[in-house]
Amino acid sequence: MDARGVLDLLDLTLLDHDASEADLDMLCQKANEYRPAAICVFAEHVAYVKSCLDEGIPVAAVAAGFPIGERDPSAASEAIRAAVQVGADEIDCVLEPREAANFPGESELAMLIAMREASAGCVLKVIIETPLLDERSMRASARMTLAAGADFVKSCTGKRGECSNEAAEILAFEVMRHGITMGSRPGVKLSGGISTLRDVYRLLELVNSEDPSIKGPERLRIGASSLLDELIG
């Protein structure tokens, strides 16, 4: 895959509650020039960046807590609906882990259902924070997330650890498994500690080894804005 192919998968991100209009303008200028898969910002910045972007560039809103996810499904639902109302095309949410033998359980399912219902009509990407999970919890969280109707299962925020090789393989396998079982085509978003093209190629090779059909921005995303300079250099 060449640099253009990676750009097509990139969620260009600026997650800073204090970002100025000048900061957001610069982000949008880069997006308009290089056409990433989406722009990812906090919900309060969605309306502004929508007004600055060329047509056809989706805006993903991070809502309901980041990097610590919301625990209350009602509060999460309210935050997501607010982001949708101001124009978000996609929603990124954290499914907050618990240190408990029954994780993920009924409370996580309730949260996922609330996320899916509130984001109806938008692409929903759920972050399961794989660096904080063992293999069983990782697989169970991915399966529950996909069963609840999420469009993407995302490795992590990058704030509490990096996307490991194991996580990339597990998420790709679970997406493949769900697709075969349910006849759907969900996706994987890889994020956390991806700083070079070498990192991208390593992780994409692992994903493709599990399921070669996971490709293109409809099914595969990369959260690694620091890559942009290398991609366009």
Image: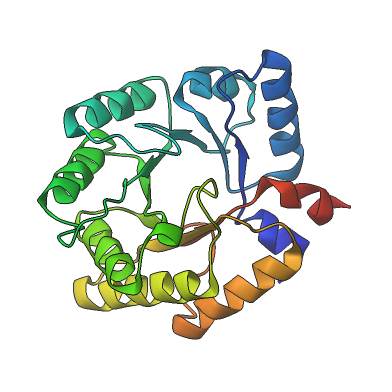
Residue 41 on image: x %, y %: 54, 31
Is residue 188 positioned above or below 59 on the image? below
Q: Which residue of the protein is positioned furthest toward the bottom in this rendering?
A: 209
Q: Residue at x 24, y 36 (%)?
A: 71
Q: Is residue 64 left or right of residue 28?
A: left
Image quarter where the N terminus lies is bottom right
The residue closer to the viewer here, 192 or 36, is 192
Which quarter of the figure has residue 96? top left
The residue closer to the viewer here, 159 or 51, is 159
Residue 51 on image: x %, y %: 58, 19
Q: Residue at x 23, y 30 (%)?
A: 77
Q: Which residue of the protein is positioned furthest toward the left in this rendering?
A: 106
Which quarter of the figure has residue 3? bottom right
Q: Which residue of the protein is positioned furthest toward the right in this rendering?
A: 233
Count of numbered tags: 0
Q: Residue at x 25, y 24 (%)?
A: 78
Residue 161 on image: x %, y %: 53, 55
Q: Which residue of the protein is positioned furthest toward the top in this rendering?
A: 21
The residue closer to the viewer here, 110 or 99, is 99
Residue 73 on image: x %, y %: 19, 34
The residue closer to the viewer here, 9 or 197, is 197
Is residue 184 positioned above or below 70 on the image? below
Q: Is residue 101 left or right of residue 4?
A: left
Q: Residue at x 21, y 60 (%)?
A: 144
Picture colour scheme: rainbow
